[in-house]
Amino acid sequence: MDYAIAALKTASIFLVVISIVPVLIWLERKGAAYIQDRRGPNRAAILGVRLGGLINSLNDVVKLLFKEDIIPANVNKPLFILAPMIAFFVATITLAVIPFADPIQLGSTKLLLQVADLDAGLLYVFAVSSLGVYGVMLAGWAANNKYSLLGGLRSAAQMVSYEVSLGLAVVGIFLMAGSLKLTDIVAYQGSNLFHWNILLQPVAFFIFLTALFAETNRLPFDLPEGESELVAGFHVEYSSMKFALFFMAEYAHIIVGSCIITTLFFGGWHIPFVPVDLIRMNAELVAQGLWIGFAIFSILGGGLLVRRFKKGKYGDLRDYEPLVIGAPGILIGFALLGLFAIFAQDWEFLPWGKNIFIATLQAGVFLAKVLFFCFFFIWVRWTLPRFRYDQLMRLGWKVMLPLALINILVTGWVVLQS
Amino acid sequence: MNHTVNCAISVPFEGTFPRIFDTCQNFDVLNNRCLNASEAVITSTVMDSYIPLLMLFAIGIGLSGGFVLLSHFIGTKKPTPEKMGPYECGLDPIGTPRQRFSVKFYLVAMLFILFDIEVVFLYPWAQLFREFKLVGLGPLLFTEMVVFLGVLGLGLVYVWKRGALEWE
Amino acid sequence: MMEPIFFYGFGGLAVVTALLMVTRVNPIASAVWLVVCFFAFAALFITLEAHFIGVIQVLLYAGAIMVLFIFVIMLLNIGAEELKARTMQFSGLLGGLVTIYLIVLITLGLLKNPVRFFEPLTEGYGYVAPVGRLLFTKYLVPFELTSVLLLVAIVGSVVMGKRKL
């Protein structure tokens, strides 16, 4: 029975995280469109409904699945197939120790909202994410292509260079929290914004953020796949779902990285200035507020969409898209208001219902923070130019490494004196 | 003999046992007494927290393998000589791609290992720092790490001065 | 009840991957099997309550040292013919003799000291904090000497790497 619950929990955490990937790809393309004044995804439609281009992501999945899976001659076949699998595998297993909310107390059992609360905590994350180098290196080597090999080598050298800074940056946080467990670090930060590590450890935050950009091979550190030099780097020869695995691994990496930044520096699932006990005491009030808020949002949003309806804009089904989405929105909003008027008076959470509600709220706050950092990754990518390779190595070894060491000693000194 | 409970996971029994249960490592439920480490039978508990982890591993392996197999079966297959050759922007490749590369890369990997080991020593140190400070050993622990980092800092300075971090 | 299953399962995995590592012709394939082998080792450590060591096994051996190995194999790119020219004569015979010697040694050792059943460790014995407590008090000198060892390694690798530039 315990194992069934554990399996269910693990699978659902995995599903939630992995289902953010297509949304992120959509956000990336949409963000690129807005920031660089390009055309974004806006064509794919199901019966005229485009959801602002989200249907394009669905389209991509189907397209990639049906594409020809080319394995060039002269490649090392087992390693060629293994490499994208390693990349995806490593990106997914890193999310094991991330706490999404406070543990739920259900009767006598305590349900952790994280896959495993390991004692080694963040050390586990570093251990498994250091294996990500293999995906890149083996892909570059197995493909028997000059661009691939150069891209793979560059990428591996870059990843190992920044991994040291990544590991050193967080030592200051452990010093203050006195634990490697992510749950303890979240508890240490609490809901007081002035006690979050972003304000206590700003240097660590910037080192960690920069190193994370380098680890995920994204601009401004995307030299391994810089299209002007190496076409696409280590995955030049990949097609179909194998390419998609690399692609998904990159976005999964961004999501897990954002989760870790949120947990370490931004108070995890805590809501700023709102202690958990306060929510627990006023759970009914919060639920009612959210209910009304959602109803009003749905009415206003639906109304705005309906106003945008103009007949003959495209001359086909797409004309009716604002109506198809907007009208049900208004209806749902009013229905929720009606239900509220009928049921909201004498109503109270059951004990377990309250716990689940609070956990959901916390997970929602956590995911909102995570999505902001995912957006930040995208924002940076379409804003900054690319580094040169010698600049990149100099930044990693000569700036970030000494800075991280000094940060540790200063933090240690401060903790010692306090 | 086998009716001992390890308190780390005995949340279901919380509140029904005396306070000693909190501090006792191995509590004998039937006789209501604390057992010494030598008397206790350790039941499998820690492994329980690793089982969800193994499940996640299984999901990761299964899904990545599944994707590869799926596209292998439903994708079209029309190989042509051009398609199967290495991609080089439309030109025929000259020479083999598997050439020897600069020793630079080796040096970076070597330095990475050495500094990674340093990081590993820093983690338990950071975790224990407050605890040691409470019992008055804080300055000792701090000095230990200053010496440790000092020696390694010397190494960093040497590497720097020798120009091994330059990337021409 | 699960622990013996895990122990023998991962032990078997370690043996199989170690054999695969030795028998592969392609050095990169060997290295990949060795990484899997290290994973099995890490799992074995964890079943033996050595949690910190288990994670370190993955972080340092699988994640750092094997990266260097693969780097070197990729950088040198020694072909099969070139490799053959460098292989010693009678290397198989020599390897066989060493293996027999090791087996004899282990058997003699086991005969001399029969297997004892140790008392089980308390839970959390191999967590990060207990290991650290020992490391920074009882084993302080070895810990500090490690830094000197690392310094020597840093200097050595730079001297060897920069010699022919």
Image (cartoon, coloured by chain):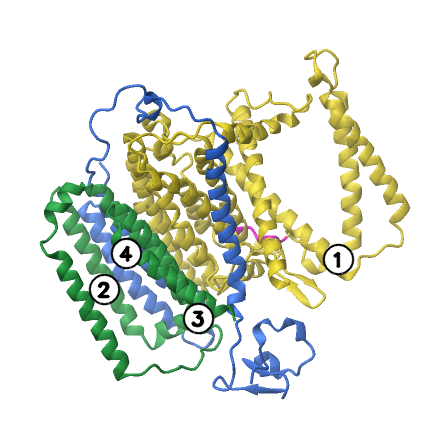
Chain colours: A yellow, B blue, C green
Query: Residue sitting at 46 percent across and 70 percent down?
Result: C4
Residues under labels 3 and 2: Cα distance? 30 Å
Which type of secondary structure does the marked residue at label 1 adopt? helix
In reply to whether residue A275 is colored magenta, the answer given is no
- The 10 Å Cα crowd at callout 2, few under 14, some 14 to 19, many 20 or more, is some
Kindly identify which chain the residue marked by label 3 belongs to.
C
Q: Which residue is mark 4?
A: B114
Kindly identify which chain the residue marked by label 2 belongs to.
C
Q: Is residue B82 above or below residue C69?
A: above
Q: Position of residue B13 (x, y in %)?
A: 67, 75
Q: Position of residue A37 (x, y in %)?
A: 53, 21
Q: Quadrant of residue A334?
A: top right
Which type of secondary structure does the marked residue at label 3 adopt? loop
The amino acid marked with disc number 4 is: Leu
Query: Residue sitting at 78 percent across and 46 percent down?
Result: A289
**CB within 8 Å, label 1 to label 3:** no
Residue mark closest to the camera, 1 vs 3: 3
- The 10 Å Cα crowd at callout 3, few under 14, some 14 to 19, many 20 or more, is many
Label drawn at residue A354? 1
Given residues C128 and B63, the one toward you in this image is B63
**CB within 8 Å, label 3 to label 4:** no
The amino acid marked with disc number 2 is: Val
Kindly identify which chain the residue marked by label 1 belongs to.
A
Q: Are marks 2 and 1 on the same chain?
A: no
Label drawn at residue C49? 3
**CB within 8 Å, label 3 to label 2:** no
**CB within 8 Å, label 4 to label 2:** no
- The 10 Å Cα crowd at callout 1, few under 14, some 14 to 19, many 20 or more, is many
- The 10 Å Cα crowd at callout 4, few under 14, some 14 to 19, many 20 or more, is many
Q: Which residue is mark 2?
A: C148
